[in-house]
Image: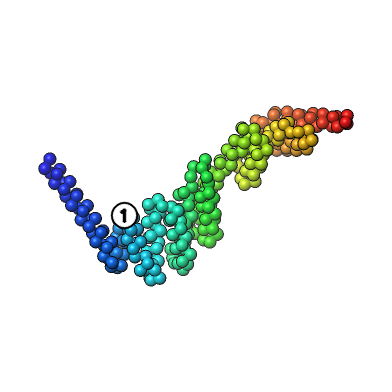
Amino acid sequence: MKLKFLYILLLGMVFTACKTEFERTRTSNDPTLILSKADSYYAEGDFYRAQTLYDIVIPFYRGKSEAESLFLKYAYCNYNQAQYLLANHYFENYASTFTSSANREEATYMTAYSLYELSPNYKLDQTYTEQSIKSFQKFINTYPNSERVDESNNLIDEMRAKLEVKAYEQGVLYYNIKDYKAAISSLNLMVKDYPETKRITEIRWLILDSSRHLAENSVFSKKDERYNETLKLAERFIRKYPDSEYIAEANRIKEICIKSLKEIQNVRLEE
């Protein structure tokens, strides 16, 4: 019991000593000492204390030779504390300030990667995902021979897959709630944005079936145009996806369109 008490007491003394050293440094008004101790904390992975001290001396070292290393470490302090939006800002600022630095490529990459860390679940707003993709693309264009290009492309693919799922589920949602006009628009946009999607057959089917529903529920004056459009979609689907699981339904929709167009023509002849 006595040994345990001594051990706890010793830990308390060490903690107090460390805290006192930090406070002494922080209030010393000695830029050289503060920067040196900040670098030590940084090397130890104590990014909170390092950042606190860097905050104090940044104004003093701005424009001096130490600034380049200091500002990069400051950006990493933010990154390593999961302050990714601030990290993105400071990495980008570093890259635009120290244009001849050997670390500029790294900072440019981290500008994009910080945004990647902010990319959320596909069900949420994807603003940061889109910004990260653009930032990685800018990195690739700026450093086409970088060893980070392959990883950047992989991350872009990962985020595009997330955006694809979101776009797909948005279109399916419109279809399920019977907003067929919105479903057609949303799914056509998805095909345009993700032409290599593995869901292409299903999406083309959903567009076709939405078009059929839209034609059926249209006012008479629009039925002719919409059934003709649906017929074209059905014929294209049958031609492109003859082995699809939806082929029987596509043929049925084609027959519905032909029959409906004849009925519309007969009504107009009787008028």
Q: Amino acid at mark 1?
A: Asp
Q: Nearer the viewer, residue 185 or 200?
A: 185
Query: Which residue is pictured at 69% across the width and 29% down the height?
Result: 249
**Disc 1 designates what residue?**
46
Q: Nearer the viewer, residue 143 or 138?
A: 138
Extreme residue in the bottom direction: 64
In the image, residue 20 lies at what x, y percent? Answer: 22, 57
Quadrant of the drawing holding the N terminus: top left
Extreme residue in the left direction: 2
Left of 68 or right of it: where is 22? left
Residue 153 lies, with reference to residue 39, above or below; the image says: above
Left of 79 or right of it: where is 176? right
Extreme residue in the right direction: 270
Query: Which residue is pictured at 71% across the width and 34% down the height?
Result: 214
Query: Which residue is pictured at 77% across the width and 31% down the height?
Result: 257
Give the image's coloring scheme: rainbow
